[in-house]
Every structure is written in structure tokens, then in C-alpha cells.
Image (cartoon, rainbow, N blue to C red):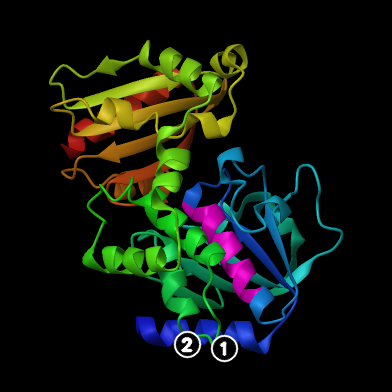
């Protein structure tokens, strides 16, 4: 078992020894995934390396201010013209999370896997996994410090974005002294913290507000008041003109109710599949729970996809949460 410092050194060697990389993050990328993608891209550009940034789907519009975020290819709209054999995966809790981008990996591809999820299964040729890091961006801060590159406000903003979003604005329990020390350094590079907080945590689109209203109309609580959940259907999405990024944060509303131990957001994909996002107050390890359904995540924030009818899925997931409580 390699130490964290040894893993960082291996990652440095992987980056320096090769060229022509494909950088991928998880499907439906969040702030940490996007910021980690562009942070790696920034590093490679400083080193004079060739690289392509790719995701299975679109990048959230609210992230468009990040360094070269508009160059992250959406393979559903603009697939690469070839395959790559040097892959850097960021913020992918397991290999499945790379989604359909896998089809652009050669059979003999070697992978650098950089991630902070405790459910990560170390699928890379080189693995840098730190489960107590607040975000993958925190690991990348440590990695960049290993290189002879000069920080600028653009990469500092990217790293700050990953930390800001994955700590819920520095409110969650993963906001460690290390996080705050890192943030202090990033602010010294010129990061505009208030702008990022407003842009990423406060600002809402009108469709986002409409779909939130729809979700709250479905709010349901268990008899003991310890589990609460909401549902959004494809028809809701269509009626509200909402897109996936408009759903971010909805799961926090049932979780934030006083006395609730676990909040759940059920996003119906189709008649036979639903995605469940779970948030815990701390008494239930939702990462382990999600992993039992083929998903993963963190102790307090996790998700999974389940097959079947919505009613059966709700009964199963809520029942499992109750048994954990």
C-alpha cells in the first residue's frame, strides 16, 4: 500500500513521462468534477503536454467561467475522432462513473485515477485516492505543488470552485483545517470568493426554481420523521424546461428538515429506472447503503441507480434507510 505522498509522486511521474492525454470526469459533472478536469488541463498546458478534455454530457452553464471549460468536449455532441491510451480520470468514484467516454480508451490504455471517494475501487494503473480529502480539487492542489509551475488566478479559481462546491460553501463536516489553509492560499492568488459563492451556491435559473417547486409538492416523510424524500419525473423536467444541472441541491431540502436523519431525492429516468440521491445527518453511512445498490459516494452524500417501478424503488430504499436507523 502506497502512502499518499508516494501516490502523488507516482502521479507526477505518470504525467511527466507520457503525453497526449484524455482527461475525463464523471457523468453529470458537478463543480468538483469540472474544476478538477480544467485544473489537470491547466497543468498539462503548463508542461507543454497535449490533452483532450471529455465528458459524456454537457458541462453546467454556471461553470462556463472556468479556465477553458468551453473546451471540455461533450461526446454526445462532439465525439473525439480517435481513441487514447493515456487517460486521467478525476472525481470518478468507480470505473463505471466515466460513462460512455470509456469507448475512447484503447484496450491497452493506462489510467491515472485521482479521486476522494471512499468507495473508489482503485481501478487505475496509478491511483491517488484520499478519502478524507474534501474534494478531488484538494488532492490536485497537493499534486500541483509537486510541479515547478507558477500558480495564477485561473487555476486557483478552479481549485477553489471544487472545494467550495463539495463542502457546501465550507459548511459541511469535510471542511477541515487543511481546507481552510488551502483556501487562504487560493484567496492570496486573487480568487474572488464572494463572486464564486453567489454564482455557484446562490444564483438560480427560473427553470431551477420551477422544478424545485414541483419537487417540494411531492415531499413525504416517514412516520417517525427521520426520513424524508421528494420526487421529480421526466414530465416535470419537460414542463419546467429544466435540465440536469437544475436539479443540483434539491436533495438538501428534505434533509434540512429538523429531525430528519436522511433526505432522499428520487429522479425518475424512465418507467423502469430511477436515480436516488441520499444525504445523511451522520447516523447513517449512505455511501455503504448506495454501494449495496451498485452506487457509491461519501458517508453523508451518495447516490445510486435502481431498476424497477418508482413505487417499489421508494419502498426499497426508504425501507433500507429505516433499517439502518
247, 229: nearer the viewer: 247
Magenta region includes residue 323: no
Q: Is residue 297 visible?
A: no
Residue name at image x 54 percent, y 14 percent: 236
Q: Which residues are magenta?
A: 32-44
Q: Residue furthest right?
A: 81
> Label 1: how many residues lie within 10 Å, few (<14), some (14-19) or many (20+)?
few
Q: Secondary structure at mark 1?
A: helix
Q: Which residue is mark 1?
A: 13
Q: Which residue is mark 2?
A: 9
Whether pointer 1 and pointer 2 mark residues with C-beta atoms closer than 8 Å, the reply is yes
113, 54: nearer the viewer: 54
Q: How many marks?
A: 2
Residue 173 position in % (x across, y down): 22, 52
Task: Identify whether 189 is placed above or below 219.
Answer: below
Residue name at image x 49 percent, y 18 percent: 211
Residue name at image x 62 percent, y 16 percent: 238
Give the quarter of the figure containing the N terminus: bottom left
> Label 2: how many residues lie within 10 Å, few (<14), some (14-19) or many (20+)?
some
165, 136: nearer the viewer: 165
Task: Identify whether 164 is placed above or below 303.
Answer: below
Residue name at image x 45 percent, y 47 percent: 196
Magenta region includes residue 35: yes
Residue 157 position in % (x across, y down): 49, 59
Task: Identify whether 316 is placed above or below 79.
Answer: above
Residue 65 position in % (x across, y down): 60, 49
User: In which quarter of the view is residue 111 placed?
Assistant: bottom right
Q: Is residue 103 left or right of residue 27?
A: right
Residue 161 position in % (x across, y down): 46, 54
Amino acid at each position: 500500500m502506497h502512502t499518499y505522498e508516494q501516490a502523488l509522486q507516482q502521479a507526477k511521474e505518470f504525467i511527466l513521462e507520457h503525453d497526449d492525454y484524455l482527461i475525463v470526469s464523471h457523468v453529470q459533472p458537478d463543480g468538483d468534477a469540472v474544476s478538477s478536469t480544467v485544473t489537470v488541463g491547466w497543468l498539462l498546458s503548463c508542461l507543454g503536454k497535449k490533452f483532450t478534455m471529455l465528458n459524456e454530457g454537457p458541462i453546467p452553464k454556471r461553470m462556463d467561467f472556468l479556465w477553458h471549460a468551453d473546451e471540455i468536449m461533450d461526446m454526445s455532441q462532439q465525439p473525439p475522432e480517435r481513441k487514447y491510451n493515456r487517460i486521467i480520470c478525476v472525481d470518478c468514484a468507480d470505473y463505471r462513473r466515466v460513462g460512455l467516454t470509456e469507448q475512447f480508451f484503447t484496450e491497452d490504455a493506462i489510467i491515472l485515477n485521482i479521486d476522494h471517494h471512499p468507495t473508489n475501487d482503485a481501478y487505475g494503473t496509478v491511483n491517488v485516492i484520499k478519502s478524507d480529502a474534501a474534494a478531488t480539487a484538494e488532492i490536485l492542489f497537493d499534486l500541483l505543488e509537486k510541479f515547478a509551475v507558477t500558480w495564477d488566478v485561473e487555476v486557483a479559481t478552479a481549485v477553489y470552485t471544487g472545494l467550495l462546491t463539495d463542502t457546501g460553501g465550507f459548511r459541511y463536516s469535510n471542511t477541515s483545517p487543511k481546507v481552510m489553509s488551502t483556501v487562504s492560499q487560493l484567496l492570496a492568488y486573487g480568487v474572488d470568493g464572494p463572486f464564486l459563492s453567489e454564482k455557484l451556491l446562490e444564483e438560480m435559473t427560473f427553470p431551477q426554481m420551477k422544478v424545485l417547486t414541483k419537487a417540494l409538492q411531492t415531499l413525504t416523510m416517514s412516520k417517525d420523521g427521520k426520513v424524508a424524500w421528494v420526487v421529480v419525473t421526466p414530465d416535470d423536467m419537460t414542463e419546467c424546461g429544466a435540465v440536469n444541472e437544475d436539479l443540483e441541491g434539491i436533495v438538501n431540502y428534505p434533509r434540512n428538515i429538523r429531525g430528519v436523519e436522511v433526505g432522499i431525492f428520487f429522479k425518475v429516468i424512465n418507467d423502469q429506472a430511477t436515480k436516488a440521491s441520499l444525504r445523511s445527518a451522520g447516523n447513517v453511512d449512505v455511501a455503504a447503503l448506495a454501494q449495496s445498490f451498485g452506487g457509491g459516494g461519501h458517508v453523508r452524500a451518495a447516490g445510486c441507480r435502481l431498476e424497477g417501478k418508482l413505487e417499489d424503488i421508494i419502498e426499497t430504499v426508504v425501507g433500507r434507510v429505516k433499517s439502518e436507523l
